[in-house]
Amino acid sequence: MVKRSKSFKKIIVSLIVIGAVSIAVTQSSFYRRISQSQRLFNQIYNQIFSTYLHELNPEEFTKATINSITANLDPYTSYMVEEEQHQMNILSKGKYGGVGIQLSYRNEQMIVIAPMDGGPAQTAGILSGDIILKVDDAFVKDMSFNDAAAKIRGLKGSEVVLTIKRYGEDDPIDYKLIRSDIKVKDITYSGMVSPTTGYIRLNRFSRNTTNEMNQAFKDLIENDVKEVIIDLRDNGGGLLTAAVNMIDMLIEKGQTIVSTKGRMKESNRSFLSRTKPIIGKDVKIAILINQGSASASEIVAGSIQDLDRGIVIGRKSFGKGLVQTLYPIDKIRSLKVTTARYYIPSGRFIQNNDYINEKVVLESEQEDSIFTTLNGRKVLGNGGITPDSIIYSETMEPLTVQYWRSGFFYSFAQENKFQYEKFEDVENDNELMSKFNNFISTKDKVRLPGEEVLEEIEEKMTALGKIDNKTKKAMNDLGLFFKNQKNDRMVSENTDMKQLLLLEFAGLFNGPEGRIKQALKDDKIVQSAINILSSDNSYQMAFKNSQVIINN
């Protein structure tokens, strides 16, 4: 018996040794393949630089090469140099060196949406609607929007000169500004949208999000809020920790918020709620999402949904379930690498599953597609968050779209702002649309869909000499049809056009916050959320809808 026991132990030890040797050999073989690949890469790289017909720019060629490497991994692993790091710095530091202006690019011009409170631009007197012609001695028209914006930013204490064109002024104005640290504001609007319903619009998840959301929630509580709408539409995400901290303010202590899994030990983590919620469970919650809601936004929406803490309204989200880690190379370069997947409380991995290059990746996990929430509702994984109530935004009508693309609404507001003292004067102007119609008559003709094609056909047929009286009459009839369509649509789309005009004036008079407040009045999804939250029956029914049925 003793001999058999000793023999058995020898066999076990031998198997362990063989297993360890096997693993070591396998790892050794893998690292040898890596070493061989690196040698091959270096050989080709050196050969190209020494023999290629033209002399190459080492920095640009290396950047292009690295970008080709990362492009074969996933959409989020990337090599970042200087300007490409700006957005990452905003998220991680919550501030940047600049002059404090929100910019937009319209009609091929760089427009000041609004100067930030207390920033160098506001202090100097730069106004909403100003057009930036030059940054120092460089003309904006000769640069891309991103390059011009990057040139305005810089180190705290450094100087930049902006040359401004302003309606009502004949000559350009030069502003000499000293850059300062500009704190990023993540919440673009927070307030009550009904006697009992609070609303928060969050546009990113950065280092500042936790404090801003904490204060916003407390302000709503002081207003005796009974329902809260958190608008994450077109919020592309940001810091994972900011999303976790935000959810922690909404759910009971001890619940799982999100977990991450990766190859490295430090990539495997679980995040639990650690504090008593600021918003009590008696307050109803609605999260608004759309196809532009991604990453951290999806963690918030998905976790609230999985824990049955609130409802999700809008359109299906983007589908980004991958975690990136930033590895600095030097002061101006870094590598952003996908290091983990994140899983929300039900176990869902919501990344769109077409991101893997199977030729490059040795193994990939297959994920389930149907999961259950805390209370047993069915929810879907693999491809974004599906709302409990799907509501589509209304699309612009054809003529309104053409005017919008041509920049007519903004141009009209910009040119006519100085006729009014405040936004309320614009709202009360009964002649507003008549003035706009007169403005339109001075602009280049706008074509409805199909009209341009008709004109091209007519030109080609005329050039070929193939157009007879019968064909000409048909062409004229079609031309008259489009003309009548425009006249009819000016009437039928009048309300939509007026809403867009008021949006532009609200932004010029009251900044981004004023624009959002005006937009909320006509926002069908926000109004639907208010209606659902204000009705106990509608709110409870939203929890019973099956996403599986919605997605079929």
Image: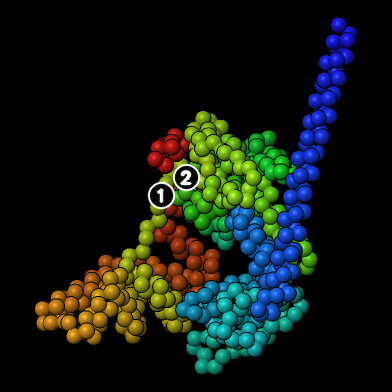
Element at badge 2? loop
How far apart are labels 2 and 1 at the CA level? 9 Å
Question: Disc number at residue 225?
Answer: none
Numbered label tally: 2
Task: Characterize the local packing of mark 1: few (<14), some (14-19) or many (20 or more) Cα atoms within 10 angstroms.
Answer: some
Task: Characterize the local packing of mark 2: few (<14), some (14-19) or many (20 or more) Cα atoms within 10 angstroms.
Answer: many
User: Where residue 540 sits in the image (x, y, percent)?
Assistant: 45, 36
Cβ atoms at labels 2 and 1 below 8 Å apart: yes
Nearest the eye: 262 or 291: 262
Amino acid at pointer 1: Ile
Question: Disc number at residue 387?
Answer: 2
The answer to whether residue 237 is left or right of residue 416 is right
Does residue 402 sit above or below 23 in this rendering? below
Residue occupying the point 78% across, 68% down = 331
Quarter of the C terminus within the rendering: top left
User: Where residue 172 sits in the image (x, y, percent)?
Assistant: 56, 90
The answer to whether residue 206 is left or right of residue 327 is left
Element at badge 1? loop
Residue occupying the point 57% across, 84% down = 142
Nearest the eye: 146 or 226: 146
Q: Quadrant of residue 207?
A: bottom right
Residue occupying the point 57% across, 61% down = 188
Q: In which quarter of the image is residue 63?
A: bottom right
Residue holding disc 1: 391
